[in-house]
Image (cartoon, grey):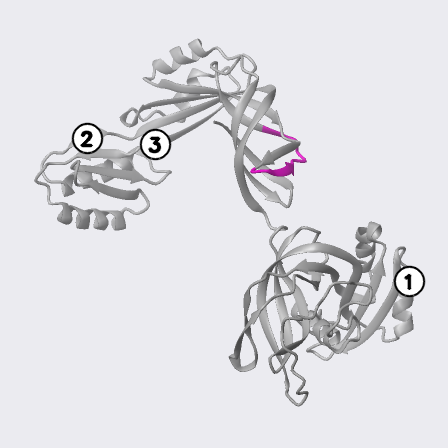
Amino acid sequence: MKKISTEAVVSIIVVILFIGSIFGFALGGRPDSDTPVVDDNKPVDTDFNLPLEVYLGQIDSNVLEIYPQIIVAGNTDIYDVEEVKGKFYEIDGVKSPTVNFNKDVNGNIVAIVKIIINGNKKEEIVNKINDFNFIKEPEIYQMGLVSLPKKTIDLVGDDNKTKDYQMTIEKMEAILGIETLKKDQILAQIQIVFRGETPTQFLILESQNLSSSPQMVFGEINSDLSDWLDSYTVVSKTNIDNNISLSEIEELFVDENLEITIKFIDNLEYKLLEDQNFESLKIDLQALKDENGTIIKDTQIDENESKLIVSFNEGYDLIQYLETKQKLSEKIEGTPLIINMPKQQINLIFNTGDLNLEAISQKLETKEVEITNVTRLAEFDLLKVTLNNIDYTFKERYATAHLLWPEDENKSNFDLIVNAFAIRDELMFVQLEEK
């Protein structure tokens, strides 16, 4: 049996909700709720000869409450109401199932069931519903209370008719995704049925949960050091023309437990002649960039300083650099002065608890390689952390940062820059940098 689409399930639920078979979202609201769903500030149109018109819009909303009510919908081959009810009664924590049947766009029978649940057993109940054999791949939703923005909403109806509607209601019930939690931020579709200018029915459907999607968060914290780790990174550099190979560095440290990476860094910069034709040079440089786009990242001309700056993409080798440099010299008038050249950066990660920096420096100097800085990996406890006045937890608990060594060796407290991804109040990935 072909699975009904989410869109079709939602549209069927909408129809049933509108006709009142499940929840009765007409003027008034839930019998057990004091939440108003009538806009008392709007004039009442008593002309019932006017046709009903449905308009749709989108709103930002916050989830205020989650109700212990679930809607389940999916294709089924059981068409007996009492039999379906009995299947749901078998689940511990479920009561008051209400069953409706309808057809999907393919003519297959769809069961739509509303149940009241024990909120403490929600996850267990949802798992058992997903394991049902008689409802094929069920779509599961829940009811809740959401806030409404007090602003004018742009609505669209049939034949692309538009209507502006000023919301004055502060909160209303909504159909939410089953994973949605209280305090989540969501985007929702609002459907309003009008008779003339009077709204007679409202319905809100969650369309996207912003809180359940990873969000980039950043900030600054002050934290005590938890532990130093046995990992040092020695950053060094040499002239690009030196063209040190990986094997040459490995031969220097045959007895060491380390990782080595080598790459080219920095820009190529020229001091141009004062009478350089800048406009002509710009055209030539653009043509050269188009021809060598995999190597040249960008070219910039500072006319005030008569300076040309050429940046390169990662991954080029010395031969490509020299060929590109030759082509650049052919485009520049006269004999320009090179004021900065790219460097070869060599990073060495030593997995040890004891680093002999002097011995390392002496070995690198034999290859004309100079150490620029050294860091040691350190660990910080971020089980609970506050960023921009929001409290987060980090289940992995510990995150690492590279701290200057030996400058920071005797420090125990650090100011750190935090870059992280978070879902709701939980950090999923954390990157730390010493401030």
Between 218 and 345, the one lying in front of the other is 218
Rendered image: mark on residue 265: 3
Distance of mark 3 from mark 1, alpha carbons? 67 Å
User: Residue 308 falls in which quadrant of the image?
Assistant: top left
**Residue 249 lies in the magenta-colored region:** no
- Nearer the viewer's eye, disc 2 or disc 1? 1
Horizontally, is 352 left or right of 134 in the view? left
Label 3 crowding class (10 Å Cα cut-off): few <14, some 14-19, many 20+? some
Query: Which span is picked out in magenta?
Result: 388-399
Mark before the other along the chain sequence, 3 or 1:
1
User: Residue 352 falls in which quadrant of the image?
Assistant: top right
Residues at discs 2 and 1 in contact (Cβ within 8 Å): no
| Residue at the disc numbered 2 | 338
Give the amino acid at mark 3.
Answer: Ile
User: Residue 19 falls in which quadrant of the image?
Assistant: bottom right
Residue 68 at x, y percent in the picture: 80, 57
Tag 2, which secondary structure? strand
Residue at figure coordinates x 54%, y 22% from the top left = 414
Residue at figure coordinates x 76%, y 64% from the top left = 138
Residue at figure coordinates x 65%, y 61% from the top left = 170
The vertical placement of 349 against 335, above or below, is: above
| Residue at the disc numbered 1 | 89
Horizontally, is 29 left or right of 52 in the view? right
Horizontally, is 92 left or right of 24 in the view? right
Mark before the other along the chain sequence, 2 or 3:
3
Between 285 and 399, the one lying in front of the other is 399
Residue at figure coordinates x 64%, y 46% from the top left = 424
Residue 415 at x, y percent in the picture: 52, 25
Residue 240 at x, y percent in the picture: 29, 27
Give the amino acid at mark 1.
Answer: Tyr
